[in-house]
Amino acid sequence: MRAEISAAEAELLLQATIKGELPDTRGRFGPFGGRYIPETLVPAFERLEQGIADHLHTDSFQNDYRRELREWVGRPTALSHAPRLSERWGTDVWLKREDLAHTGAHKINNAIGQALLAKRLGAKRVIAETGAGQHGVASAAACARLGLPCRVYMGAVDIERQAPNVDRMLRLGAEVLPVETGDKTLRAAIDEALREWVTDPDGIYYLLGSAVGAHPYPYLVRELQSVIGHEARQQIIEQAGGLPDVAFACVGGGSNAIGLFYPLVGDADIELIGVEAGGTGDGLGQNAATLATGTPGVLQGCYSIILQDEHGNVQETHSVSAGLDYSGVGPEHALFQAIGRVKYISATDSEALEALEELCELEGVLTALETAHAYAAAKKWSADNPGKRILIGNSGRGDKDMPTLTKYPARTRSYAAT
C-alpha cells in the first residue's frame, strides 16, 4: 500500500520542505527516510551526523567547498539555450549543463563535498560504490585531490558496460572491486560497501553517491547537490527573462533530480517532472521505474518506495542506462510524489536512445543515457504545451556510454531534415 497523506498534511509537509525543516530530527521526510541499520553501524552513522552538524554549514567548510567548486570543478556550469531543439519541439528549451563539470557529471559536487567532510572527520581512507561509474570517477578524483586512499565497489555487469569509467578510476589512483553477488549492479555494490564499512567504521568514510540510504545521507547529498538548482534558477532568470514553466530531470537514486528540484520546490508555478527508466516493459525486472510501480519498504537502511514482489523480496531491475538501474529511490522523492509536488513518469530504453540521437544531431551534445530519459519525456510534454519554457537537467556526458551505444548503431534518420 502507498503511504496515505491527506491534502492538509501534504501542504504542511510542502511548507516544511520549503522552510528547510525536513528531514526532521529522526531523519524523516514525512513518512519516508529514517535509519534502519545494523547495530554495528550505529556509531558510524551517529559520528557522521554529528560531523555534518559541526561542519557542513560553517563558514570554514563552505568557503573550502565553494572554492573547490569554483577553481577545480568549474562551477557555475553553463545554462545553454537549445535553439534547434526548441524549433523542432515548439517549446523554449534550456539545458543545465552538468556534463561540463569536472569528471563529466553532477556527481563531482557531492564527491568533493563529502571528501572534504571525510578529511575533517579524520578518515584514513574512503570507500564508494558506483553504477554508471560517474560517482566512482568523481570519488576517485576528489580523493586524489585531497590525498585520501579510495576503493570503489562496482557491479560486474556495470563494469562490462562502463569500461571507460573503470579505466578512469584506475588512472585516478582508485582501487576498483568487482561485485559478483546479487544483481551485480548498483544495489549489490552498495551492499558490499556497507559490509566493508562495518569492519572499520572509525577509519573508513563511506562516500555514498546518491540521495538514498539511511539518514543522514539523503540530507547530506541533497545539500551538496542543491548547487545545481540554485545556479539554474538564477541563470534562467538572467538569460531567459523568467522562470521555466517546467523542469525535467532523470531519476535513479535521485541525486541529480533532487539537486535541481529542491531549490525550485517553493516556486509553485514551476511543474517538476522526474523521469525514471521504463526499460523494456511494465513487469518486475523489466524496468527501474520505482516510483511508478513500486511500493513502500526498507532498502539499504531507508524506508522509501522500492521495487519488490508480493513477498517483500527486492527485485532486480533493467535499464539501458547503468545509472538508473536501481531498485529504490531517495526518500525525499518518495515524499514529493506522495504530496503531489513532483510528477514521476518513465521513458523506455528505445525512447531514451532516440532522444539521445536527436540531441546529438540538433545540438551537438552527447548526453548520458540517464539524462536521455528526461529528454524523451520533455519532447512528449512539448507536444501538448507549445510555447512553454523548459529546463532540463543535463546530468552528465555520454562518453561513458559508448560501449553500450555501439550496440545500437546510429539511425540514418536526419532530424535536421524532418
Image (cartoon, helix red, strand yellow):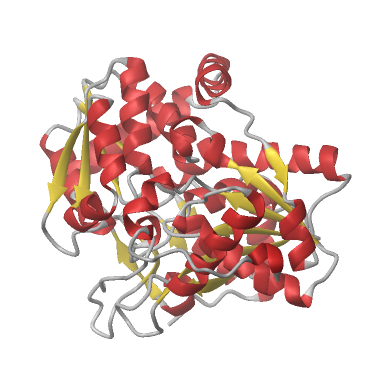
Estimate the x, y position of residue 396 in percent, counting from the top left. Answer: 50, 45
Residue at the location (51% across, 72% down)? 351
Instruction: Compare residues 315 and 156 and report the one nearer the observer.
Output: 156
Estimate the x, y position of residue 212 in percent, counting from the top left. Answer: 39, 52
* Quadrant that contains the C terminus: bottom right
In the rendered structure, the answer to whether residue 70 lies left or right of residue 289 reads: right
In the rendered structure, the answer to whether residue 305 lies left or right of residue 4 reads: left
Residue at the location (67% across, 61% down)? 12
Estimate the x, y position of residue 152 in percent, counting from the top left. Answer: 22, 38
In the rendered structure, the answer to whether residue 180 lies left or right of residue 338 reads: left
Q: Is residue 61 visible?
A: yes
Estimate the x, y position of residue 367 in percent, counting from the top left. Answer: 52, 51
* Quadrant that contains the N terminus: bottom left
Residue at the location (89% across, 44% down)? 241
97 to 116, vertically: above or below = below
Residue at the location (84% across, 37% down)? 238
